[in-house]
Amino acid sequence: MFKNLLSRIIQLLSVVVGLVLLVFILFQALPGPEQILSGQRTDNSTREAIVEELGLDEPVYVQALGYLNDVSVISIYAESKTPKGIKGLCLTPSNNYQLWVKLPYMRKSFQTQQQVSAILWGAFGGTAVLALAALIVAGIIGIPLGVLAALKANSKLDYTIVGFSTLGISIPSFFSAMLFSWIFGFVLHDFTGLSMTGSLYELDALGENYSLRLDHLILPAVALGIRPVAVFIQLTRNTMVEILNQDYIQLAKAKGLNESVVIWRHAFPNALNPIITSIGGWFSSLLAGSFFTEYIFQWKGLGKVTIEALQQSDFPIVMGGVLFTACVFFIIHSLTELMYVWIDPRLKH
């Protein structure tokens, strides 16, 4: 158990280091934030002052190492350069170089000067709700259709359902988001009553109080859930076809058990392992894959916040969003594997 945990921690650290270096290199191709903060007509001295203040005058590898030091749990700072926003314990307060044990520090936004961690946590709720809603839609539609296709294997109904799932897998989420937004939010708006854009909470007409708008969740959740619906259909169908041909299922039928009992009590529980693994993987994928869907529907979440920050060259938010999503992805995959072992104890060996 300890070796497995240590291995996972090393994997996570490797991913974080790799992402930091990759994003730092890619970010060099974007316009510098000093151009946006100072405006196009500002003189060179002002821009140089902004560059120095943001630490952008240092070599890329120095900036990358400095950022890794900030997001690390254990960090070393020169006393005069210790960030004001860190939260933790300084183990050597009287030295010129201070040793800190702290929470990861993701710095402040270039644009708003707010803590990046606070911005991301505020946006994560919207992304999690959207991903969970899309997963529920996928499960409610995909699993029953997969079971139905398995029961009618090699029939016209089976071919129709599998064909629908193949089409769903081939449609990118951003395209289905644009299609659903335009058709159901604009063309059929008078009939559906749904909006092209909107978030979970919306200010009232006076701009004073927020109101819960669950109707804004329908279109982005369905658009984002199209691809997992297709995957759940094929996975459930293929697994159920294999299980329904097992000897113990044939024996249960020979004993005269009701067909629904055979299907839902004996066959379906044994098909849950790959389905649950897929659910865990797709939930983490939906968290990462919802970026463009959120932006198209103007749904306030990690995707919308990160893309807007990318347009403004707000590097701390971009980097924080990438690392935050990677860590969530890693944690969910680890929990999924634990659930897999819990459902099938044979995997412990």
Image (cartoon, rainbow, N blue to C red):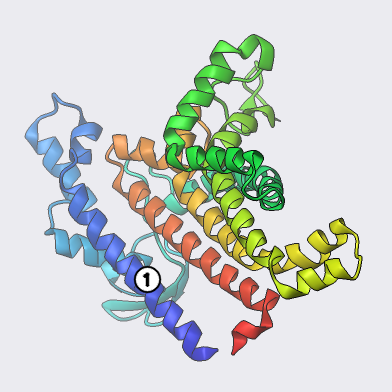
The spot of residue 167 in percent (x, y) is 49, 37
The spot of residue 190 in percent (x, y) is 65, 9
The answer to which image quadrant residue 264 occupies is bottom right
The spot of residue 284 in percent (x, y) is 51, 56
Residue plotted at (9% across, 37% down): 45
Tell me if I can see residue 236 in this picture: yes
| The N terminus: image quadrant | bottom right
User: Compared to 173, does 337 lie above or below?
Assistant: below
Amino acid, disc 1:
Ser
The answer to which image quadrant residue 9 occupies is bottom left
- Give the camera-side residue of 333 and 308: 333
Tell me if I can see residue 85 in this picture: no
- Give the camera-side residue of 61 and 280: 280
Task: Report the residue marked by disc 1.
Answer: 72
- Give the camera-side residue of 228 and 330: 228
The spot of residue 132 in percent (x, y) is 63, 48
Mark 1 element type: loop
Residue plotted at (63% across, 56% down): 236
Residue plotted at (63% across, 78% down): 341
- Give the camera-side residue of 65 and 108: 65
The 10 Å Cα crowd at callout 1, few under 14, some 14 to 19, many 20 or more, is some
